[in-house]
Amino acid sequence: MPNKLTPEQEMSHRTRRGFLGLGVGAAVAAGGWQWLNSGYYSGGDVSAPLRAALQFNERVVRGALFSDQHLVKTYPASAIGDLKENGDFGLSDDFDADDWTLQVMPRGGGLPVTLDLDDIRKLPRYEEIFDFKCVEGWSTVTQFAGARFSDFTAKFAPGSDHARFVAMATPPDDKGGKAGYYVGLDMPSAMHPQTLLAYQMNGADLKDEHGAPLRLAIPVKYGIKNIKRIARIAYGETEPPDYWRERGYDFYAGL
């Protein structure tokens, strides 16, 4: 028959087991934290494991849920509200709309095309009234009018609808010529029938703070993808730089 431990010995035994368990738990937690924070992407602040999870979610949404036949809910004009002047990245105060042009880089390295607003206004005009949603949690029913991005692509970059991605950027800033804001889009979302290159909002021409003279209105994405004051559009096969992706957000940013 084994010797019975005294109360003091039993307490000491349990204490040692408790500290051993805490040590193992701490080691597992530390290892998990190191794994989650391992392999940071250059130019970003999201670890490789977390980025892989975001990319997996994107594949699920794109492969199983997204369809260009699924239209975002639209609203009557009576539901229109006042959209916040949210985000001024790339909106220089000394911008002159009369000097604005749009440079288009077709898929496959074709010759670039330079356009002005009259070129875009010649395309069929469409309008959408949808609930503009921000990643901050607010939304506002807003009307946008302009040209469908699919019509724009067919006219000014024929064949580029077969690209995998499209990149958009604001005019270069005064600090070395880099765009102040830029987004990357998957081509299926860009070619969605409700995606517009908009030059009007709520029945009037765009104001500077809302991206005049031309902005993106893409109802299947959060507001961070609805880039204002577009000055460059480029079609390509590799995922382009994206302002908020580099700061930890999902590249897809879809609803």
Image (spheres, rainbow, N blue to C red):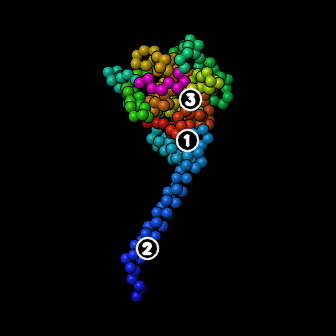
* 121 w.r.t. 154: above or below: above
Residue farthest front in this picture: 8
Q: Is label 2 in contact with label 3 (beta carbons under 8 Å)?
A: no
Q: Is the residue under label 1 in contact with that under label 3 (CB below 8 Å)? A: no
- Residue 81 can be seen, yes or no: yes
Residue 195 painted magenta? no
Which residue is found at the position 57% from the left and 15% from the top? 100
Q: Residue at x 59, y 13 (%)?
A: 99
For label 1, the residue is: 45
Camera-side mark, 1 or 2: 2
Residue 30: percent from left, percent from top: 52, 56
Q: Earlier in the sequence, mark 3 or mark 1?
A: 1
Going by the picture, which residue comes out furthest to the bottom?
Answer: 1
Query: In the rendered image, which residue does mark 3 sit on?
Result: 182
The region drawn magenta spans 84-91
Residue 13 disc label? 2
Q: Amino acid at mark 3?
A: Tyr
Going from the N terminus, do you reach mark 2 or mark 3 first? 2
Residue at image coords 67%, 26%: 110
In whole angstroms, how far apart are the C-alphas of marks 1 and 2?
45 Å
Label 3 SS: strand
Mark 1 surroundings within 10 Å by alpha-carbon count, few (fewer than 14), some (14 through 19), many (20 or more): some
Mark 3 or 1: the one toward you: 1
Q: Position of residue 155 (x, y in %)?
A: 57, 21
Locate residue 218, reporting x and y percent: 47, 28
Q: CA distance from mark 3 to mark 1?
A: 17 Å
